Image (spheres, helix red, strand yellow):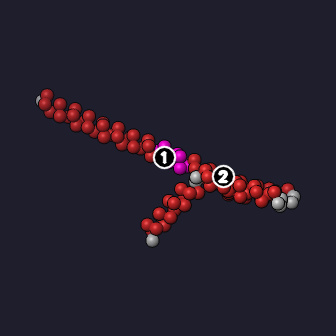
């Protein structure tokens, strides 16, 4: 069950963090305003807050988080390769020091 939940969460987070999801949600939010609009300040404020923060902003936040994660993954790979290089250099230096003794 845990493996299925992880798989489903990965797929949903990928789909929900795509910019195409942002555009689809934006259209789904704006198109109904042609037929009916909220009446009054409170209705508009509630509509805008719920729509912008829940519907439109969340895919963008997910997209930027995924981009940051990709960058940090690439950085970690570079760090790992540098560590391997340092370790191999250290082994070579130790071998040369042994030969000098």
Pointer 2 local density, CA inside 10 Å: few below 14, some 14–19, many at least 20: some
The image quarter containing residue 55 is bottom right
Q: CA distance from mark 1 to mark 2?
A: 22 Å
Magenta part, dominant SS: helix
Magenta stretch holds residue 77: no
Checking the image for residue 23, the label placed there is 2
Tag 2 or tag 1, which sits nearer the N-term? 2
Where does the image place residue 19, in percent across and percent down from the top left?
A: 61, 50
Secondary structure type for disc 1 = helix
Residues in magenta, as a range: 65-72
Secondary structure type for disc 2 = helix
The answer, for residue 53, to whether it is visible in the render is no
Q: Closer to us: mark 1 or mark 2?
A: 2
Q: On the rendered structure, is 100 left or right of 53?
A: left
The image quarter containing residue 92 is top left
The answer, for residue 65, to whether it is visible in the render is yes
Q: On the rendered structure, is 33 left or right of 13?
A: right
Q: Is residue 13 above or below residue 2?
A: above
Where does the image place residue 29, in percent across and percent down from the top left?
A: 73, 57
Q: Residue at x 26, y 34 (%)?
A: 89
Q: Residue at x 17, y 31 (%)?
A: 96
Checking the image for residue 21, the label placed there is none
Residue matched to label 1: 70
Q: Residue at x 14, y 28 (%)?
A: 100
């Amino acid at each position: 069950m845990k493996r299925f939940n992880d798989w489903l969460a990965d797929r949903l987070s990928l789909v929900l963090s795509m910019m195409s999801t942002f555009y689809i949600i934006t259209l789904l939010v704006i198109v109904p305003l042609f037929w009916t609009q909220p009446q009054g300040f409170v209705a508009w404020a509630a509509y805008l807050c719920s729509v912008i923060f829940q519907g439109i902003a969340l895919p963008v936040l997910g997209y930027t988080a995924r981009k940051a994660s990709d960058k940090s993954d690439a950085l970690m790979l570079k760090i790992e390769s540098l560590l391997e290089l340092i370790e191999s250099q250290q082994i070579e230096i130790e071998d040369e020091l042994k030969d000098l003794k």
